[in-house]
Amino acid sequence: MSDLLVSVRDDTVAVTPPEPFTFGRHESCSYVLDPLDRGISRVAGAFVWENEVWWIVNRSTKRALHVVDPLGLSVPLPVARSGWPPSKRAVDPGGLRVLVAGDVWTHELQASYSAPPLSSTIAELGPGLTTSAHSPVLTDARRLVLVALVSGYLQRFPRYDPRPLTYAEIADLVNLPRSTVVKRIEAVRDQLRAQGLPGLEDADARRPLAEWLLAMRLVTPSDLDWLASQVGLDGNRTSEPE
């Protein structure tokens, strides 16, 4: 058994198994991030000890957590949904960072093992979040607007901005009519929704869609360079195949 060392701001707490470590804005949490920032869920998430491994679990039903692995890749943990497996990820042997985005500030928690765990155990357990969905095939036309949608998520902290762009912002960035942007994004949203992914029912589902795209690795930070090469090209993209 290994303690988990959790650092927030200038504080470091050693968490001993099997006690969980919760964080959010409510006073009942092990660590209160900001009791006045209502952009943070009452209980945003928790580090829990399961199967001899520490996990980061999203406990919120409204806001995603954002996990930064040792390679610097930021991936959202989607919100908790009734009837679905917990949205969680095993803490990597080298540790990881968790970003909690509020309305006032984005808080950063760093977690690491006090003693190295067995990396083979973590590999066998996998990332924890599983669905029955099959990844849709993305044409370059759809990929263009989707990468633009999540471009803020793909930046490294502290430039990391967990906010999906608006349709108007995407249209301006990729030089396409807003109606074309909406059509392409909605086509992908409909595919994922038909496969049972939760959170995509609202009229404006840009945020949950962005989080699923990243959680499923349909869009990655390497796509930022591809996007830059595309938006630098001249031409009418409205004629591209959908």
Image (cartoon, rainbow, N blue to C red):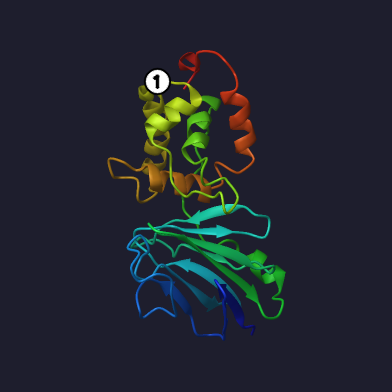
Looking at the picture, how far across and down is residue 160, in whole percent? 54, 50
Image coordinates for residue 194, horizontal then vertical, percent: 37, 41
Q: Is residue 24 above or below residue 66?
A: below
**Residue under the point 49% across and 18% down:** 241
Q: Residue at x 38, y 30 (%)?
A: 168
Tell me residue 153's x, y (percent): 52, 47
Which quarter of the picture shows residue 193? Answer: top left
Q: Residue drawn at (60%, 22%), measured in percent from left and top?
A: 232
Q: Residues within 10 Å of mark 1 (few under 14, many from 20)?
A: some
From the viewer's perspective, tell me whether residue 26 is left or right of residue 171.
left
Q: Reply above or below: 136 against 25.
A: above
Q: How many marks?
A: 1
Q: Quadrant of the N terminus?
A: bottom right
Looking at the rendered structure, the secondary structure element under dot 1 is loop
Q: Where is residue 139? Give x, y as percent.
A: 53, 27
Please name the residue shown 58% across and 64% down the image: 97
Image vertical order of residue 205 relative to residue 110, above or below? above
The residue that disc 1 covers is: 177
Amino acid residing under circle 1: Pro
